[in-house]
Image (cartoon, rainbow, N blue to C red):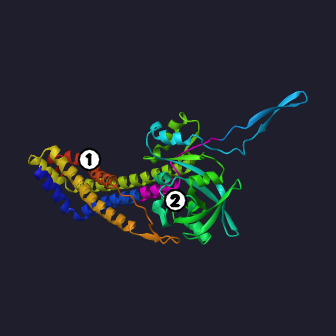
Amino acid sequence: MNVVFAIALRHLQSGARQSALTVGVVAISVTVMIVLGGLIDGLQRRLINSITGAIPHVVVQQGPRTPLAIPIESGTFAVEKLIPFENTQRKIEDWQELVGNLPSRAAHITAVSPTVDGQGYLYRGARRKAISIIGIIPERHNQVISLSDKLMNGKFLDLNSGEAVIGIRLALDFKLKVGDKIRIQGTEEDSAGFTVVGIFDSGFRNLDDGAAFIPMRGAQSVFGLGNAVTSIGIKLDDIYAANQVAEALVGQIPYEVRSWMQDNEGMLSGLRAQSIFSSLIRLSTVIAAAFSIASILFMSVTSKRREIGILKAIGAKRQQIAGIFALEGALIGVIGGIIGVSIGIFITSLITKIQIVSPLSGRLDRMFPVELGFNMVAFPAIIAVAIGLFAALYPARQASKVDPIEVIRGQ
């Protein structure tokens, strides 16, 4: 084996330029796979987080009610008049029992938060604006949607009666700061005064521009719900299990259950198409690298037929001859893989350092959210070695078939 390795290494050194070119192709292929994979995976994660970061993974709520059909006599015919339930509030009366046992009804559930939400108005002096009023139990809601980490000023977890937390865009629009007084009115003409005790920058425009978080009791009073809530938000340890969890709950509770995946099917379809496109690019780079290695090794077999013939004449076996060129391919893959991984990690580390400043909060955020895990690095490296071995199979086989007598005769 030492002799095979020495001859393979000598072949690579004798054709240094060709070897360097082939190693470069493999290295570029590995670099492309790492950088492209990290970028696409990071962008997909950011896109998914932009959807799931401001909403629960699964929502339990009262489903739409069927209009009531009332028979009405009209001459000799009986017709039905549909009486819609437009003014009937959707609410969950037994929410406390559900919050307690939902985690035991389906896997993957890590947190549950009852919520009272509805449309209303925020008043500041003579000015008003339509907003989403969200009544929550701060500790529970923060486990489902973490807002404490997004706070710029004030507090969230210690939210008390008569206090509100609003988004940065809404605060700027009304020139509000912590300690200012506002009035919030629900659609039922019930209103109450609140003190702004926190301002957050979630990064989600709809939330930052038009939402006010208040204690659940205050929201129940504003909307006249008594002790009921309008929905229950659920957080999962695997966001892609949302449909599975929703389907499991549908048969167990008498409420509508929806997952974030059901409401964002178009986005998920786009992500799948993006992943397919990424895989095609990676496949193209792998094929290009394989053809490059195979062509270089095939040329090496052609140019070294005399040496191969002499080796076989002095007793080298076919397996040893084939092993020389297979080892050459493996060495090219290993060296190219090491160089490609190094360059790929270096480029991605540079990309992750590029930051942009939020014009509202001044917070620094990464421009390119590259996700570079172990698999993202190990897979291209393994592929590089596999490319080298696979591409060397045909040249190695051709080398093992060289007839030493014909070569020595000069035929």
Residue 45 in the magenta stretch? The answer is: yes
Magenta segment: 39-63
* Residue 389: % across, % down: 26, 49
Identify residue for label 1. 393
For numbered disc 2, what is the local secondary structure? loop
* Residue 359: % across, % down: 52, 72
Identify residue for label 2. 159
* Residue 206: % across, % down: 59, 60
* Residue farthest toward the left in the current orientation of the protein: 314
Query: Of 284 and 157, which appears nearest the observer?
Result: 157
Query: Of 8 and 181, which appears nearest the observer?
Result: 181
Q: Label 1, label 2: how many angstroms apart (C-alpha)?
A: 69 Å
Query: Of 76 and 289, which appears nearest the observer?
Result: 76
* Residue 50: % across, % down: 51, 57
**Residue pictured at 21% horizontal, 54% vertical:** 328
For numbered disc 1, what is the local secondary structure? helix
